[in-house]
Image (cartoon, coloured by chain):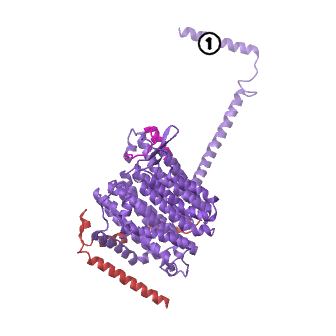
Amino acid sequence: MEKNKIKNVVRIAWGIFAIALIILLGLEPVIHRHTEFGMDGKTLFSAWYGVASGVFLIFLTKLVGWFLKRPADFYNDRRKS
Amino acid sequence: MEGTGFIIPPAFIMIFGALLLPFLGNAYRQAAIIMLPVLTLFAAWGVPEEADYIAHFAGFPLHPVYVHPFTLIFATVFCIAAFAGGVFGLSLVNKKKLSIAEMTAAYIYAGSAVGATFAGDYITLFIYWEIMAVASTVVVICGNSDGASKAAFRYAALHFIGGVVLLAGITAYITATHSADIGHIDFDIMSIFEKHVRLENIAAALILVGVLINAGAPPFSSWIPDAYPEGSPVGAVFLSAFTTKTSVFVLLTIFAGSQILLYIGLFMVFYGIVMGALSNDLRGMLSYSIINQVGFMVTGVGIGTEMALFGAAAHAFCHILYKCVLFMSAGSVVYMTGVRKTTELGGIFRTMKITLACGIVGAISISAFPLTSGFISKALYMEGAIDAQMSLVWFMIAAGSVGVAALTGCKFIWFVFFAKDSGRRPLDPPFSMKAGMIFVAALCILPGILPQAVYFMLPAQIEYDPNTSAHIISQLQLLLFGCLAFFLLLPLQQRTDTTTLDFDWLWRKFTGGFLLLLERAVFIIFSFITGNALVAYEKVKTEIHRWHGQEGVLARNREIGSSMLFATAMLGAFLVFYYISG
């Protein structure tokens, strides 16, 4: 019962999030972007740069994790496990 | 510098007040915990801008109360953090779940940080610097966790090494300039590679390294995620506020515009994001995010324009507030559940509603969402990068902001409070812990709505309004689309019960193994040398014995006639050589 309730809440949260993103994209023509370095003045720069940076950093984290992750008892004490 | 009359250093109120805490009754102790930071704040604000009380020590004029351009903003936020931490811990002090020793050490630590902001000379700065190191070590030890004492030992060792480097730099600086006064140093890292390197440049390099160790700059950064998670729920709040930000204050005062800081700062930004995202300890995650946030400030110091420097100072102010609320939220979770691994948490949003709400405020503030404190401070050094026409720096700071929103803000809230249901149903923490959290959470929002509430403490008035519609919308696009990437790629980011290797692997594992190898190598070499030496010694001894021993050629008893004959032959040979040589 509670699982279904949570699923509904998650769906609603995703819906609100999607609406917020669409509104933000819709507001793009309204704002006057200041171009300082060329690329930052392009339409929807912030949106695609946000996604691209997020994806890049998540994959970078995954890559670094492959090399640096060790078992939790690696140092035989309870530090930053 | 012309001296002014005697002024009580504001830090003394907090430090000496803290020393009285163990001797006070419970009611007076609670009053003191609340009032000491308030009184210190009043005292700090009461110090006139031109104040400069001069004391003499070892022939040097000391300036224990000197107002630097960024003193006011740092001293203010240090007092606010001490107040919030004190209120947060009151319930635990009452229940005797927080030792008086820890609260005393925490207030001495906070007071020393305030003192460092008023230090007009290197000797005073160094004294406060070391008091901070000792007091914060005590705070770590009082964490009483399994690894607290070991982490505290490593913490102390690194801080004392940093202190020694700083002291060496200060000594060299005083030798070179015959002055201990703190002021801006125009430092270029390349100057120490010149053929005839000047002592001032060596001094500046040593001071910079000493300060950067305390700032958590890699490779000397791992003490933060090593020690801070070992602190108690209250101790960690204090630990998160002072050491690294005092270093930022010193960098702003002495090394503004040093280009090397630009590169160090940008590295810290991404290092903190990536390593934090890999951490399974909820306070370890936040500890790495301190490195990331200090990285933004160090970058601002490295950019060096007025706007960037103001941004670094304002960001330190705002950062202390939202980091306090995040550590309070995380500490409340640890206190109420007894669990610190995110793999063992999740689903606690049902019962820890106030802790969640405050955590969300901290998370959106650290992510620099509009109408929060992080937004109004980060905007300043983004403007600073524009002023300096540093396009790459600007793009990297923007990408770093996305990383913080997605991999720190979203990750902390999602994996601690939501994600899979751990089955735990902890309640919100005791009253004073909630009060402390709510107080700081409110302070995270206030500057977002009224940026001038922070800007007015900067050295000069600025007419900058970050809350324009274009800025707000583009920032929301940047952050929310970054968060979209986080949620879409959630399956890639599942928690694992692991630890992540950091630079401290060098001295925790590698050095141990290396020393063992070295010991064996030394033993083998030593055995080889001593073995050969013994053989050689025996040979020499035999030879000496052969010639000079009892029956040796040169030691044998001879008849007196033989000796006379030998002496006559030698004399004859001498005469022959004498005549031949002319």
Q: Position of residue B550 (x, y in %)?
A: 76, 27
Q: Nearer the viewer, residue B503 or B62?
A: B62
Few, some or many C-alpha atoms within 10 Å of disc 1 (few <14, some 14-19, many ≥20)?
A: few
Residue at image location 30% in from the left, 80% down from the top = A22
Please, which chain is the residue tagged with disc 1 on?
B
* The colour assigned to chain A within the rendered structure: red
Left or right: B59 as drawn, with respect to A37: right
Q: Position of residue B172 (x, y in %)?
A: 47, 41
| Badge 1 amino acid | Ala
Image: B327 above or below B254: below
The residue at which mark 1 appears reads as: B573
Q: How many marks?
A: 1
Chain letter, colour purple in render: B
Quadrant position of residue B392 = bottom left
Q: Nearer the viewer, residue B41 or B264?
A: B41
Label 1 sits on a secondary structure element that is helix
* Quarter of the image that includes the N terminus of chain B: top left
The reply to whether residue B511 is visible in this rendering is no
Q: Which residues are magenta?
A: B165-187
Left or right: B267 as drawn, with respect to A28: right
Q: Residue B175 in magenta?
A: yes
The reply to whether residue B445 is visible in this rendering is yes
Q: Residue B300 in magenta?
A: no
Residue at image location 37% in from the left, 75% down from the top = B485
